[in-house]
Image: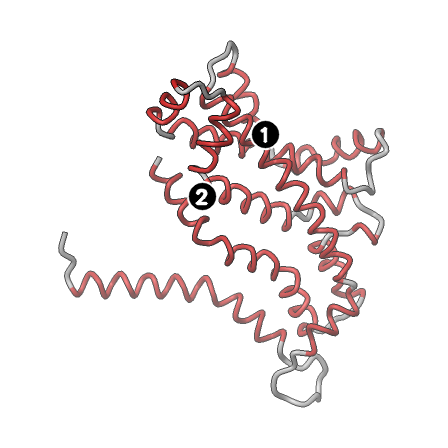
């Protein structure tokens, strides 16, 4: 199909407008982070704001906690989602439809509705103020989406390849680990990246479960940074950049697989 010059110009204008809207807040935060933090200070760029925010806000501890929690959630949720997605997508067993829709209830219940009873349950088990109080609920919430995501991938995978593997004597574990998962690397990486972003940005759960400052995650540390350590917008913007930087780096490293996985998911 041929596209006229006018249609191409309109398309570029719309895309440029959308890019400006998306990037404007990020540019404003980055520019603010490089401004002087004190009134009357010398003009120009002030990259030392990042070091000052890191030192005052104790962000080394907060980022380490977020990395531990996010890494554990991504690893456990990805493995379990691949297993449950394969079971619901490629295996036939009694009650599979009912079990699948029961699992999907986890997608429909907002975390705000369960966080209070969840707090009392974990407190009765002595798990509040621990990494497990953040990891276990996040794994449970991620597993519902992961099962739905991987089931769709396994159901859309090539039946001819699977049948050929079965004729060669391959079992379910061999088909999953040696054939379907290597073929579905974009889908798995996209799912893992979404798990990482959701866990990293989670604020409500650490706010309720964690009172020990040494166990606070990065978003919770950022909220406490304002007012407790600084009232300046420059240091606060620098701290926000530090907290968001790991997610941006991970996305840039995996963006090719992420876009491919999202496009394939949309097509299916």
Q: Quadrant of the C terminus?
A: top left
Name the spot of residue 34 as percent of width and height, x first. Answer: 62, 78
Horizontal arrangement in the rendering, residue 161 relative to residue 221 (left or right): left
Residue found at the far top of this picture: 94
Seen from the viewer's position, the closer of residues 235 and 250 is 250
Q: Is residue 204 above or below residue 230?
A: above
In terms of sequence position, does the residue under pointer 1 or pointer 2 come before the other?
1
Horizontal arrangement in the rendering, residue 136 relative to residue 93 (left or right): right
Q: Residues within 10 Å of mark 2 (few under 14, many from 20)?
A: many
Disc 1 to disc 2, C-alpha distance: 24 Å
User: Badge 1 is on which residue?
Assistant: 106
The residue located at (24%, 63%) in the rendering is 10
Horizontal arrangement in the rendering, residue 58 relative to residue 165 (left or right): right
Seen from the viewer's position, the closer of residues 176 and 259 is 176
- Circle 1 SS class: helix
Quadrant of the image occupied by residue 164? top left
Residue found at the far front of this picture: 168
Q: Is residue 248 above or below residue 70?
A: below
Name the spot of residue 62 as percent of width and height, x first. Answer: 75, 56
Q: Is residue 42 above or below residue 135?
A: below
The residue located at (74%, 68%) in the rendering is 54
Name the spot of residue 99 as percent of width and height, x first. Answer: 55, 18
The residue located at (64%, 69%) in the rendering is 237
Seen from the viewer's position, the closer of residues 171 and 72 is 171
User: Badge 2 is on which residue?
Assistant: 186
Q: Residues within 10 Å of mark 1 (few under 14, many from 20)?
A: some
Horizontal arrangement in the rendering, residue 242 relative to residue 17 (left or right): right
């Amino acid at each position: 199909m041929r596209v006229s010059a006018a249609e191409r110009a309109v398309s570029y204008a719309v895309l440029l407008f959308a890019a400006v809207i998306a990037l404007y807040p990020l540019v404003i935060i980055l520019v603010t982070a490089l401004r002087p933090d004190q009134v009357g200070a010398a003009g120009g760029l002030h990259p030392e704001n990042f070091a000052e925010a890191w030192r005052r806000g104790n962000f080394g501890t907060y980022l380490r906690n977020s990395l531990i929690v996010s890494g554990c959630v991504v690893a456990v949720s990805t493995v379990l989602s691949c297993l449950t997605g394969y079971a619901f997508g490629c295996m036939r067993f009694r009650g599979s439809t009912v079990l699948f829709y029961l699992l999907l209830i986890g997608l429909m219940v907002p975390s705000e509705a369960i966080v209070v009873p969840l707090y009392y349950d974990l407190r009765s088990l002595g798990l509040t103020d621990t990494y497990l109080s953040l990891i276990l609920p996040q794994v449970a919430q991620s597993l519902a989406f992961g099962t739905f995501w991987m089931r769709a991938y396994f159901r859309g995978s090539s039946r001819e390849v699977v049948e050929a593997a079965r004729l060669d004597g391959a079992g379910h574990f061999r088909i999953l680990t040696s054939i379907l998962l290597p073929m579905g690397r974009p889908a798995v990486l996209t799912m893992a990246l979404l798990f990482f972003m959701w866990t990293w940005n989670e604020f409500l759960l650490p706010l309720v479960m964690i009172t020990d400052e040494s166990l606070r995650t990065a978003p919770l540390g950022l909220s406490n940074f304002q007012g407790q350590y600084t009232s300046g917008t420059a240091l606060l913007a620098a701290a926000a950049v530090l907290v968001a930087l790991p997610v941006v780096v991970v996305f840039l490293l995996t963006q090719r697989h992420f876009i491919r996985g999202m496009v394939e998911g949309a097509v299916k």
